[in-house]
Image (cartoon, rainbow, N blue to C red):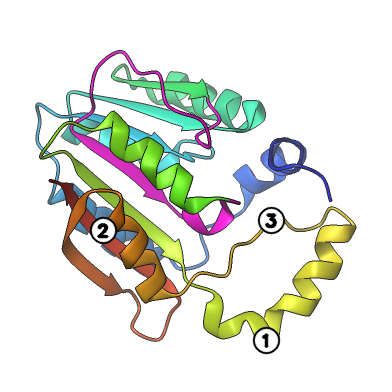
Amino acid sequence: MINAEQFWNRIARKYAKRPISDMENYHKTLDRTKSYLKPTDYVVEVGCGTGSTALLLAPNVRAILGTDISSEMVAIAQEKAEVDGVTNAQFRTVDVSLPLTLPEAPDVILALNLLHLAEDPVAMIGNLAASLDKGGVFISKTGCLKPKRWLFGPLIKVMQVFGKAPFLNYLGVEELETMIRDAGFELVESGTYPRKGISRYIVARKV
């Protein structure tokens, strides 16, 4: 199985052209996230992909830094920022399985559609928690795939062998919430949108 950086670099340009599958719920997630942001905030998005979300949130904050393990994804995000004339968004290639080095402590960290791709989500959440000061906000949306493992697991495993799917961590909702609490957060909001979906949206505050 190819590593995460190789996988996402290889599909980056094709991924950038792919339309969002559920635009309604994407905008619901954006709106919920915006409600936690302030114009003075410094925001870091980990696993930013091609930068679409970071660029849409940029007008609501002082500055936003998007990071991704894929240098190709970051290059696309930088191109989009330049075309759109967004001056308060920057993008960097960063492996968030390692401790983050940031110019200042962020007010908010976003990890949208990322934690289920982490081989060690406990370590990743711990690294993100260490980057926040007390009171800092951590917002995540995570595919909680554990109930579907029996259905998708065998097919995904074959696809991974041929480099057609990334690593997937089959997390459950309670397991994920416990990981976040154990990293030093209190949960502010936790819900699944849409209700019959598998993506858990969690807002947590560092205590």
**Which tag, 1 or 2, sits closer to the chain's start?**
1
Q: Which span of residues is magenta-colored?
A: 94-119
**Within-10-Å neighbours for mark 3: few <14, some 14–19, many 20+:** some
Q: Amino acid at mark 1?
A: Trp
The residue carrying mark 3 is 167
Circle 1 residue: 150
Q: Residue at x 49, y 28 (%)?
A: 80
Q: Residues within 10 Å of mark 2 (few under 14, many from 20)?
A: some
Residue under pointer 2: 181
In the image, is residue 96 part of the stretch drawn in magenta?
A: yes
**Position of 200 relative to 10 (above/below):** below
Measuring 51% from the left and 31% from the top, which residue is drawn there?
A: 98
Label total for image: 3
Dominant SS in magenta: loop
First-in-chain label (3 vs 1): 1
The amino acid pointed to by label 2 is Arg
Q: Is residue 36 above or below residue 148?
A: above
Ranked by sequence position, the earlier of labels 3 and 2 is 3
Q: Residue furthest top?
A: 103
* Residue 100 figure quarter: top left
Mark 3 secondary-structure assignment: loop
Of circles 3 and 2, the one toward us is: 2
Q: Residue at x 25, y 17 (%)?
A: 104
Rendered location of residue 51, percent (x, y): 46, 36
- Which residue is at the front of the view, 73 or 131? 131
For the residues marked 3 and 1, what is the alpha-carbon distance in whole angstroms?
A: 16 Å
Query: Is residue 122 visible in this depiction of the protein?
Result: yes
Mark 2, secondary structure of its residue: helix
Nearer-the-camera pick, 96 or 91:
96
* Residue 110 at x, y percent in the picture: 33, 43
The residue lying at 69 percent from left, 56 percent from top is 167
